[in-house]
Amino acid sequence: MPTPTDLDDATLRTLIPRLRRFARSLVHEPAAADDLVQATLERALLHARHRHTPDALQAWLFSILYRQFIDEHRRGQRWRRLAQLFSGGDAETAPSAERVAASHATLAAFDTLPAEQRALLLLVSVEGFSYREVADTLGVPIGTVMSRLARARQALRAASDTEPKPARPALKVLR
């Protein structure tokens, strides 16, 4: 069983890059993401009365960040495109032009998803959260996470599907 941990400097330093990545996926702008992480940490430090296990601390911080985002979003904040989240890479393993084009299409499709669906996909796919952790983070039942995640994946597939659909053959009506 993990031992409880305080909200100390060393612990926060290990979680800040993940919080920043999640924030950037939500707000699409590095400066706004940093502001969101800062507001999250301020709120966490103000309410850090209990010792948390590392997993619970991580879920708690991501939950605060997501709720902070929702609060700001409800106040009418406008968010820009997600462009650099998946950027970077190794020069030795440079992707092919086709993979780059597919990545751009996927990112463009990802950007069209509602913030709730982007958050679900990122928490599960990028951050590696379990469905239970996502449910706790977002404050919804696990079944809701599963159904919303299925819809988010379906919407992403539909939005990023660049292959033309085969034309249906014309049918002749026989009487």
Image (cartoon, grey):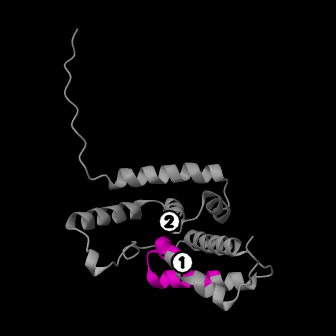
Q: Is 15 drawn above or below residue 148 in the view shown?
A: below
Q: Secondary structure at mark 2?
A: helix
Q: Is 170 left, or right, of 141 in this rendering?
A: left
The residue at the point 53 percent across, 64 percent down is 119
- Which residue is farthest right? 49
Q: Secondary structure at mark 1?
A: helix
Residue 23, percent across and down?
A: 52, 76
Q: In which quadrant will I find the N terminus? A: bottom right
The residue carrying mark 1 is 18
Q: Nearer the viewer, residue 99 or 160?
A: 99
Up the image or down, 31 lies above or below 26; here it is below
Q: Residues within 10 Å of mark 2 (few under 14, many from 20)?
A: some
Q: Residue at x 55, y 84 (%)?
A: 35
| Side (left or right) of 121 relative to 139 | left
User: Could you tell which of marks 1 and 2 lies nearer the N-terminus?
Assistant: 1
Q: Residue 79, how many percent across, how many down?
A: 45, 73
Vertical order, 90 against 114 (above or below): below
| CA gap, disc 1 and disc 2 | 11 Å
Instruction: State whether residue 78 appears in this view.
Output: no
Q: Residues within 10 Å of mark 1 (few under 14, many from 20)?
A: some
| Amino acid beneath label 1 | Arg
Residue 4: image quadrant is bottom right
Which residue is depicted at the point 35% across and 76% down? 87
- Per the image, the residue denoted by label 2 is 122
| Residue at x 22%, y 39% (from the top left corner) | 166
Side of 14 where 49 appears, left or right:
right
What segment carries the magenta color? 22-40
- Residue placed furthest toward the front: 1
Q: Is residue 137 magenta?
A: no
Residue 8: x percent and y percent?
A: 70, 89
Type of amino acid at the residue the image marks with label 2: Leu
Percent position of residue 13, x then y: 59, 87
